[in-house]
Image (cartoon, rainbow, N blue to C red):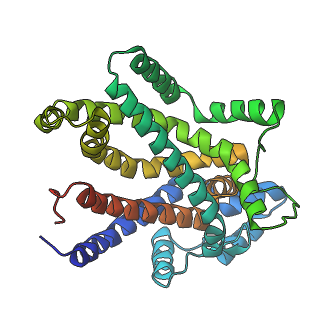
Amino acid sequence: MQTPLAYLFRRLSQALPMAFAVVLLNFVLLKLTPGDLVDVMAGESGSATPEYMESLRKLYGLDVPAPLQFLHYIENIACFNLGYSFRLNAPVFDLILDRLPATLLLSLTAIAMALLVGIVFGAVAARFRGTVADEAISVVSTIGFATPLFWVGLMLIVGFSVKLRWLPSSGLSTVGAIYADNLALVRDIGQHLVLPALTLSLFFVSIYIRITRSAMLEVYGLDFVRTARAKGISETRVVVRHVLRNALLPIVTITGLQVGAIFGGTVVIETVFGWPGLGRLAYEAVTSRDVNLLLGIFLCSSLIVIVTNLAVDLAYALLDPRVEIR
């Protein structure tokens, strides 16, 4: 059995080739797509000459072969330089650093909401298996799983923003607002966060309900649960202390796997709600063929997924003492 420090060092050393593979794959895929930044700029101007386009490619480093472009990009990453966004006239690192907090706020809030609601309703469905409550929760989770997120977002905007006027429909905060204190700022951001976080969490709530229900039903049939009941322990304590705790391992696994899907979902949600995060920035980078910015966003997202998987492995050891860190 390794020490936690040795295990952490080994996993971080494994993360380096994984990050390199992600960068290489993303670079190759982006280069295989037709056109580049200069083609987009030429199409927008409508009067660009071949000589002018060639000078732009030379200026942006697009006139050299793709392998040399990749080597130059790897050298920049080694120096903690993600390149320059010629479209937005700013360093890629600064653009990502500016948008990352908004995406993390949205993603973490959505995950927390999905876990809380999914575990609670999944536990209720498992506890009252075969009853009307179980059937109702199953039907609702199926509907949530099958409903497109962008449609849910649009319906929430129509209902709560346009019709009821309870919540704002877009943005991170009210434009031009003057806040009396930090609490007023937090309240305003919270109001803007409700609809996009609720929309993003809906799909994952359905998954966590099903996983929690299945895992708890499996644990209910084990010997130690029957032993706990035979000792006269209350059913609530049996559910919380014994059944739910042992059913958390598959939930933790799914949570780690869903981090990448969460970041993929933010592209749609941030675009629908005008949320100024990495997802919306990635959409803008795609439409403008800003390769440097896209590569930086992909690299940042992959690193977050790698770190999350490491945290999931460590959480296993905390939840189940039988799991050894190897």
Residue occupying the point 60% across, 71% down = 62
Q: Residue furthest front?
A: 232
Residue 47 drawn above or below residue 124: below
Provide residue 306's location: percent of width, then percent of height.
38, 62
Quadrant in the picture for residue 239 = top left
Residue 183 visible: yes
Q: Residue furthest bottom?
A: 79
Quadrant in the picture for residue 123 = top left
Residue occupying the point 75% across, 30% down = 159
Q: Is residue 115 left or right of residue 196?
A: left
Q: Quadrant of the N terminus?
A: bottom left
The foreground one among 314 and 49 is 314
The foreground one among 2 and 164 is 164
Residue occupying the point 84% across, 64% down = 179
Provide residue 308's location: percent of width, then percent of height.
39, 60
Residue occupying the point 75% across, 67% down = 182
Residue 172 visible: no
Residue 257 drawn above or below residue 198: below
